[in-house]
Amino acid sequence: MKLQLVGLFCILALSGCAQQQKTWQKPGAGVDEFNQTRYACLQQVQQPYSAAYVGRYGGSASGGMTTNAGLYNACMEAKGWALIDNVIADSPSYAAAIKDINEDARAVCRNPDFYAYYSWAPCQVRETTAEQLADRSRVTSAEKPVLAKVQAELAAINARLVAAHRQYNEKQGNALATNIERSLLTADKIRREYLEGRITRGEYNKRRRDLAIESDSEAMRIVRGI
């Protein structure tokens, strides 16, 4: 349920080296999304090269493919990723806390007991389909207990996330945590409206997607120091 995971950072670098000064970061993204985006961008920016040499005693030629770094960065940024100062990777405790939180969040998404919810409200909110946005169904009594269990799991995860930001990130942690808390208040309102039958599944999905995008943008503004 990405609505409840706004502000969750997956700290990733192309080499995975903790000594790097910058890493690719995107609020709400996980390892799978990073790998998929990285692969797609690399496919788009591979360029052929060739070289030839002819001398007095003969010649040689070579060729292959090379990566255009500028185009690669532009592709990543167009898909919502930003190369920013590696605040978390410089703090092993911070990195470990965020890693555990990411893993637990993904476990919630994969929990078969929650399929009745995630089958129509995608965990990866940016992957919401046109069909899911157009869904005119409303809440059923059978799904209410499932949604309550999902919410309980994610509330605990978000509490850990907020605490980790404030504990380990002296520069930006409070702003990131506040952004999450503000978004969660709006998320609770959207969820109540759905549970009360005032909005459809499609409306619920659209509003949770829009909220996640808005919160992600604010989180990126914070980490960029804008």
Image (cartoon, rainbow, N blue to C red):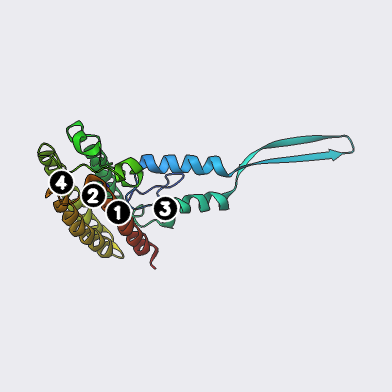
Q: How far, Cα to Cα, is label 2 from label 1? A: 12 Å
Looking at the image, residue 104 lies above or below residue 220: above
The first of marks 2 and 4 along the sequence is 4
Q: Pointer 3: what residue? A: 80
Q: Please, what is the three-letter code of the amino acid marked with disc 3? A: Gly
Viewer-side residue, 37 vs 148: 148
Indicate which label's residue lies in the foreground, 1 or 3: 1
Q: Quadrant of the N terminus?
A: top left
Viewer-side residue, 226 vs 191: 191
Q: Pointer 2: what residue? A: 204
Indicate which label's residue lies in the foreground, 2 or 1: 2
Q: Pointer 1: what residue? A: 212
> Tag 3: Cα neighbours inside 10 Å, few (<14), some, or many (≥20)?
some
Q: How far, Cα to Cα, is label 2 from label 4? A: 15 Å
Q: How far, Cα to Cα, is label 1 from label 3? A: 12 Å
Q: Pointer 4: what residue? A: 151
For label 1, the SS is: helix
Mark carried by residue 165: none
Q: Quadrant of residue 22?
A: bottom left
Q: Please, what is the three-letter code of the amino acid marked with disc 1? A: Ala
Q: Residue furthest front?
A: 136
Indicate which label's residue lies in the foreground, 2 or 3: 2
Marks 1 & 3, CB-CB < 8 Å contact: no
Answer with left or right where residue 164 lies relative to residue 219: left
Q: How far, Cα to Cα, is label 3 from label 4? A: 26 Å
Q: Please, what is the three-letter code of the amino acid marked with disc 4? A: Gln
Q: Quadrant of residue 219?
A: bottom left
